[in-house]
Amino acid sequence: MLSTIEATINPYGQIVWSEPVQIDKSQKILITFLEKPIQTQVLKNNSPFPVVTLDQVAGCLAYEGKTKTLEDMERELAEGLKNEKTAGC
């Protein structure tokens, strides 16, 4: 059975497992060294959309008017879906 468990090497050269591990005497382990820890690797952004900040898009969140209840929102969603289904008929 193969399993993957994260581990780091402390300043003393000891392996520190991310969770408890039981290794038998005859069991083999495979250690793969990463160039950098995963949390510090920069992931390439393959999104076709530009990166924006919250400040750049928060303006669309403004709503002036009567506070809507959850029931109001659910009813309006249902009406919108019903109109969308019958629009092509």
Image (tube, grey):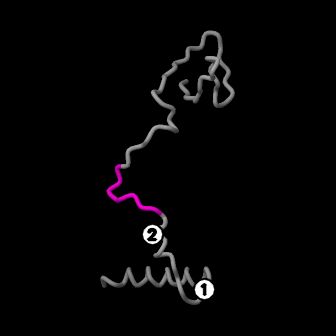
- Label 2 sits on what residue type? Val
What are the residue bounds of the magenta stretch?
A: 46-53
- Which quadrant is home to the N terminus? top right
Q: Position of residue 8 (x, y in %)?
A: 59, 26
Residue occupying image coordinates x 51% and y 32%: 37
| Viewer-proximal residue among 53 and 8 | 53
Most distant residue in the bottom direction: 66
Predominant secondary structure in magenta?
Answer: loop
**Relative to 57, is 62 above or below?**
below
Label 2 sits on a secondary structure element that is helix
Residue occupying image coordinates x 35% and y 59%: 50
Confirm whether the magenta stretch covers residue 51. Answer: yes
Residue 67 is marked as 1
Most distant residue in the top direction: 26
- Label 1 sits on what residue type? Thr
Q: Where is residue 25 in the image (x, y as percent from the top left)?
A: 64, 10
Q: Where is residue 65 in the image (x, y as percent from the top left)?
A: 55, 89
2 vs 1, front mark:
2
Q: Residues within 10 Å of mark 1 (few under 14, many from 20)?
A: few
Residue 57 is marked as 2
Is there CB contact under 8 Å for labels 2 and 1? no
